[in-house]
Image (cartoon, grey):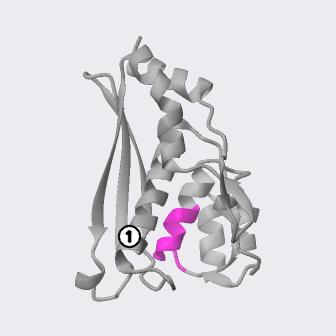
Amino acid sequence: MTINEKLATIQTKFKSKKSRFNSFGKYYFRSAEDILEATKPFLLELGVTVTIKEKLVKDYFSDKQNFPPILKTTATISDGENAIHATAIVGVDLNQKGMQTPQQFGSASSYGKKYALGNLFLIDDTQDSDATNTHGKGATATLTSTKDPAFAKAKDYVKSGGKLEAIKKKYKLSAEVEKALTTL
């Protein structure tokens, strides 16, 4: 069986419930740990390993424009000879109230892992409140540039099957951003 066939087996048989509850946003979600736990039965059966690597690709303190730090997370499935990779790019919100810097990085890291694994295993989160939740605020944030770190997140969301309407509920989009997301 090729690595592609092994991955396709996992993608079609994968089951992971949204067993965690966000009491602030009042929704259920699945974590990276939930996804990894659901893949464990396939590892020995198919003779594959799943790994996750993270890299700081944009350092806030050396960036003259002061964009947030950016983490690139790569999830890999390998059979020892061949490998398939999927990535997620996540900005670290250093202005997150009530969190210390290690918590801000940890939160971004967890989010990146979840979405890299979701991309690898084709987990459809289009109905996942975690992807579209506005915490009752409506579309108060604006997304006006394709260089905004939030655009990369929105782009990944649309590419993985997410709906533009869900993004519009969270962000007020500029014409440039809406056009870029529509043409994906």
Q: Which residue is mark 1?
A: 105
The amino acid type of the residue labelled 1 equals: Phe
Residue at figure coordinates x 58%, y 81% from the top left: 144
- Tell me if residue 11 comes above or below residue 45 in the rendering: below
Disc 1 secondary structure class: helix
Query: Is 54 situated left or right of 44 in this image?
Result: left
Q: Is residue 7 above or below residue 119?
A: above
- What's the residue at 49%, 31% (across, down)? 39
**Which segment is the magenta one?**
145-154
Figure quadrant of residue 44: top left
Residue 139 as seen in the image, left or right of residue 147: right
Q: Position of residue 13 (x, y in %)?
A: 61, 24
Residue 147 falls inside the magenta stretch:
yes
Q: Nearer the viewer, residue 91 or 19?
A: 19
How many labels, in total?
1
Residue 140 spot, x, y in % from top left: 70, 84
Magenta stretch: includes residue 69: no
The quarter in which the C terminus is drawn is bottom right
Question: Residue 54, how many percent across, how many down?
Answer: 31, 55
Answer whether residue 172 is visible to the viewer in this image.
Answer: yes
Nearest to the observer: residue 5 or residue 92: 92
Can you say which quadrant of the picture contains the N terminus?
top left
* Label 1, residues with CA under 10 Å away: few <14, some 14-19, many ≥20: many
Residue visible at 44% across and 66% down in the picture: 108
Residue drawn where x is 54% and y is 43% of the image: 34
Q: Is residue 44 above or below residue 87?
A: above
What secondary structure characterizes most of the magenta part? helix
Q: Position of residue 97 (x, y in %)?
A: 51, 85
